[in-house]
Amino acid sequence: MAQTINTTTKFPKVVIIGGGFGGIELAKKLAGKEVEILMLDKHNYHTFQPLLYQVATGGLEPDSIAFPLRKIFKGQKNFKFRITEVKKIIPELKIVESTIGDISYDYLIIATGSATNFFGQNEIEHFSMPMKTIPEALNLRSMILQNLEEALLEPELIRKDALLNFVVVGGGPTGVELSGALAELKTHVLPKDYPELDISQMDIYLVEGSPAVLGVMSENASKAAKKFLEEMGVTVLTDVKVEAYDGKLISLSTGQTIHTKNVLWSAGVKGQIPEGITPENIVRGGRIKVNEYNAIEGLNDIFAIGDVAAMVSEQYPGGHPGVAPVAIQQGKHLAKNLIRVVNNEKPEPFKYFDKGSMATVGRNRAVVDIGKIRFQGVFAWFVWMFVHLMSLVGFRNKVVTFVNWVWNYFSYDRGTRLIIRKFNRKSMTEEPISK
Amino acid sequence: MAQTINTTTKFPKVVIIGGGFGGIELAKKLAGKEVEILMLDKHNYHTFQPLLYQVATGGLEPDSIAFPLRKIFKGQKNFKFRITEVKKIIPELKIVESTIGDISYDYLIIATGSATNFFGQNEIEHFSMPMKTIPEALNLRSMILQNLEEALLEPELIRKDALLNFVVVGGGPTGVELSGALAELKTHVLPKDYPELDISQMDIYLVEGSPAVLGVMSENASKAAKKFLEEMGVTVLTDVKVEAYDGKLISLSTGQTIHTKNVLWSAGVKGQIPEGITPENIVRGGRIKVNEYNAIEGLNDIFAIGDVAAMVSEQYPGGHPGVAPVAIQQGKHLAKNLIRVVNNEKPEPFKYFDKGSMATVGRNRAVVDIGKIRFQGVFAWFVWMFVHLMSLVGFRNKVVTFVNWVWNYFSYDRGTRLIIRKFNRKSMTEEPISK
């Protein structure tokens, strides 16, 4: 079945798979140019992934960090959008197979981002919680609250302990931010909500396989983050790997075991690669190898940007880091290059401008690296908040998030600990939408 | 299996089923009194039902109109809460059977509110959308947005029409507010989001079986509401009943048929009566008959308040209207009576103080009846907003809702048209949580 999406002009058709940071930037920069854009995404909204952990821990509602894609491109005449899941790319026919039919393209941009990587450990994948999408963050929130309610009813001590213990796997920014947020819930919110529970029984562990948390940042940042987490009551285990998890007991490479029903997995990502990309184009980390123009060599007119792409260079032997600024800069750059290509001009190679990196651990506690400048603590925390607030798409989202943050700061509270949809592992594994 | 919920005192145990307006008010007024309170609810939050239609139409997020029950009673020492579903009441044993085990009581208060009533029309129930809970409102929002996306892809004219047509059944406050909100979406939001669709093809019908919309209010209010709706483009059909609906075509008592995939049902409610209440205690409208002390006669120490209760009197032959102020006043009054009963004093009969009623149709358009005082239009709209804002539980909810309303007013926009969880009818009928 061929999908008819009306072509009103003779301009080349640019199909973008994915409405993340890269896809959006690309489509915006092509506004008013002589191309026709069609964006495809599974969801009708853009997700601001850096703040997903606040949705999971009840600090923000989904609408603060999500933005309707149609609204972003309101009034952009050369832009069309469809909700669909891409099944396969057929480069020879210049066609994308999707759940709404076949879609033809002149230029195809894969901007599908990354998914959680469990490195083939199926049992761990089944029992632990990923957090890469809004439905996943909401599942996590429901699960945390449901386990606390269950702990109230549980007479057996080990089972009660398992309901109260949290193990966050992976000490990157997500793992650090998530375990910090859990520690704040434990200190400021839960004792008031659950006076019947002895919240001091709740233990939070952060397990990291490498020798340091925030390993991608400076040593100063790593050390400060570890210190902050420990001050807040998180047990930080570095150089430790997860060996097994059966839904009740997690076994670590040190031989230690922890009874827990709450394992949050942020230990790895891999590119979300659509079918039809040949294995020789896929490199370590499950990303698509691209050249300095973000083109996939050997495939005509197919490009990849952002997390899913690996532009290998001397400075970045594994490709650029999987962060929003890379996706944004590649989207912007590719837009210019596409126009050059359409006009038979020579494209220019991409060059990444690293603006620095930052992570927050908790109230008044963050770490910032900007080139050689490194600082930690209260000022870093304000910088972190300002940068994230400004990066949110849409003025309304900025306002609502700001109001929530100010509220949370002064009340020591989290507004939204509602179980709107009950989480159950069965529905999660069977219903594709919540995966 | 008997559920142990620790009893720390010898005070009588008051079990309240339901955390709606009535249950909350009752439990609050018993703070510091010599009773032990246990509240049971399916959800961990209180729902402000009067604004559910704004969640369904993307004007507000769930967290603005929901409030965690544990947080409401933070610090109230004689209060405990459990998430559970009540299966059955056994008055002879003074026990409630629930999904977390048997719970004993000295006094039992049924404050379970009302559910959607389809009057035994199973096919209509299967295919149309109710809106009494937050999951239902979110399902409705997802369905509306998904049908618009599908309309973009639908080449067949009648099927496309069916995706764009909306039929709201029931011209009470909910039906009026819902069809008004749909009309505003049609005028201000959808043309920008869906430039490819001819939104003028979208028709909104409000179908009411009696001769007037807002029949419970004054004639002035009814007439004004009808006029407002028609100005906004809603086709108001009064004295018309729905005969059948098969998911595609709705048949009306006039013989008229409308192709539609969007039927929103707000035509009736019935009490949510737990098993164990004998049929002789249930009156018309599926409510529990109570005496002037809210007690169920023939059952010792069992009371019912709010929507689920029918206190039949000369002035209210069918019981009081199913609105929040009745539930609140009955909760407050029953608290005083329970204390009187515990102290071996004589309880006092309940008397309803009718503060008036109001409904909003759209921007600058509302109707208000306060005793003999009746007004409609811009001022009524401000009164409506003020009263609803002040009635919201929690200061944070008031602030967030206010910010959203100001934003919506000036931008002519609705912030949150996100499909977070895909709606499909199968999951709705099979998964109890979304019912």
Image (spheres, coloured by chain):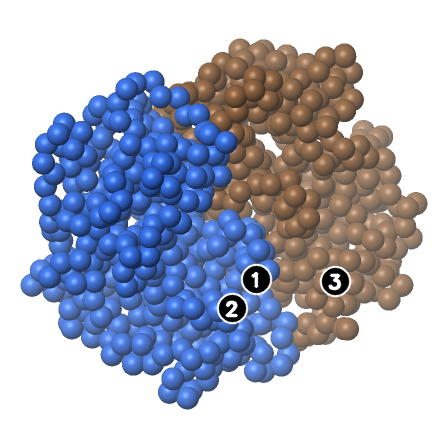
Chain colours: A brown, B blue
Q: Quadrant of residue B182?
A: bottom left
Please rate how many residues cluster around mark 2, counting C-alpha atoms within 10 Å: few if below 14, some from 14 to 19, many from 20. some
x%, y% of residue A34?
A: 68, 66
Q: Which residue corresponds to the image point at 11% horizontal and 61% vertical from the top-left?
A: B315
- For label 2, the residue is B127
Q: Do marks 1 and 2 both belong to one polypeptide chain?
A: yes
How far, Cα to Cα, is label 3 from label 1? Answer: 23 Å
Which of pointers 2 and 3 indicates the residue nearer the eye?
A: 2
x%, y% of residue A280?
A: 92, 45
- For label 1, the residue is B425
Q: Which mark is residue A98?
A: 3
Q: Which mark is residue B32?
A: none
Q: Which residue corresponds to the image point at 68% horizontal and 48% vertical from the top-left?
A: A430
The reply to whether dot 1 and dot 2 touch (C-beta < 8 Å) is: yes
Q: Do marks 3 and 1 both belong to one polypeptide chain?
A: no
From the viewer's side, name the closer residue of B45 and A13. Answer: B45
Q: Residue furthest bottom?
A: B255
How far, Cα to Cα, is label 2 from label 3? Answer: 28 Å
Total numbered circles: 3
Q: Secondary structure at mark 1?
A: helix
x%, y% of residue A334?
A: 73, 50
| Lower sequence index among marks 1 and 2 | 2
User: Which chain is mark 1 on?
Assistant: B
| Residue B188 seen anywhere in this rendered image of the structure | no
From the viewer's side, name the closer residue of B402 and A70. Answer: B402
Q: Quadrant of residue A113?
A: top right
